[in-house]
Image (tube, rainbow, N blue to C red):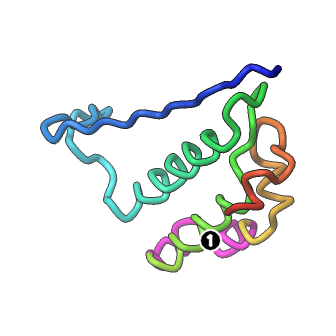
Amino acid sequence: MGTEHECVIRLGCDAFSYPVNFDLSRESVPWKDIQVTRSLLLGGLAQASVLAGAPGYIKLSSKLQRFVVQDWIHEVPERRATYGDALIEQFNDLNWISEHSGGREDNGVFDSIF
């Protein structure tokens, strides 16, 4: 018989705690800009929960990254000027995203449910 593995992710939030930023402010990045980071972190947690127990470093889903960047640039179109259309358009190419991500592929396990 195989051994069962359980993955438990506990997230807690203290309403009176704030992250310490490098400039010691409560929020050093405008919320519209940090949203992309928060979305990728949440996606990474979801992917990790699906792939719990997988050995080694797994790339963050290219489909997730594409979705987050496309949604973010749709919500904050003024950032196109900051990053340029050429870079933003690269996020339409799943191969480009994968080539610029660390780790190994997860064989599409997470992508199939995304």
Residue 13: x and y in percent read 26, 39
Q: Is 103 colored magenta in this rendering?
A: no
Q: Which residue is mark 1?
A: 84
Instruction: Give the answer, above or below, for where 55 lies relative to 25.
Output: above
Q: Secondary structure at mark 1?
A: loop
Q: Nearer the viewer, residue 62 or 10?
A: 10
Instruction: Give the answer, above or below, for where 48 lies relative to 96.
Output: above
**Which segment did they paint magenta?**
76-90
The image quadrant that residue 2 belongs to is top right
Residue extending farthest front: 1
Q: Nearer the viewer, residue 27 or 68?
A: 68
Identify residue type, mark 1. Answer: Gly
Magenta stretch: dominant SS? helix
Question: Which residue appears at 48% of the width and 34% of the height?
Answer: 9
Q: Work out which quarter of the rendered image holds the C terminus and state it.
A: bottom right
**Left-right relation of 31 to 77:** left
The image quadrant that residue 44 belongs to is top right
Q: Is 78 colored magenta in this rendering?
A: yes
Question: Which residue appears at 49% of the width and 56% of the height?
Answer: 39
Q: Work out which quarter of the rendered image holds the N terminus and state it.
A: top right
Q: Nearer the viewer, residue 46 or 80?
A: 46
